[in-house]
Amino acid sequence: MEHIAALMLLVGCSSDLNSCNEIPVPVPAYETLADCERELPLQVRLSDSAMPKVYGACKAIEPEMFEQSASLEWSVTRDGRLGIEIVADDARQIASR
């Protein structure tokens, strides 16, 4: 069975969702997606955000992504869903071949 890791992201937003910022979490990486999802509700409640709305999500990722240069892209939908995408930096991958 292939080992999968997970990343937690919290985002605080204004009431109208026009302004959102990442919120630091004490443990951003987890060994399993289940571990991350189990901790997510607690971290949302404990977040120290001045923003009126806080959203959180966990994203399963391949462990080697922690070793690569990558960008974390996220968005919040009007219905309050936090979407996360991890995009590998192709330029770095090409340079390392």
Image (cartoon, grey):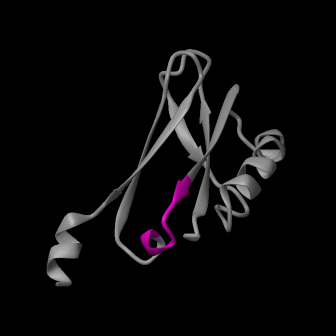
Tell me which residue sits at (80%, 41%) in the image: 41
Horizontal side of residue 68 vs 19, given as left or right: left
Horizontal side of residue 84 vs 14, given as left or right: left
Q: Residue furthest front?
A: 1
Tell me which residue sits at (83%, 39%) in the image: 45
Residue range of the region highlighted in magenta in the rendering: 60-65
Q: Is residue 61 magenta?
A: yes
Tell me which residue sits at (68%, 33%) in the image: 54
Instruction: Report the front residue among 20 and 30.
Output: 30
Where in the figure is residue 75, as x and y percent of width and height? 45, 34
Tell me which residue sits at (80%, 49%) in the image: 38
Instruction: Report the front residue among 20 and 79.
Output: 79
The correct choice, above or below, for 17 with respect to 62 in the image is: above
Q: Is residue 71 magenta?
A: no
Where in the figure is residue 62, as x and y percent of width and height? 48, 66
Instruction: Report the front residue among 46 and 19.
Output: 46
Q: Quadrant of the C terminus?
A: bottom left
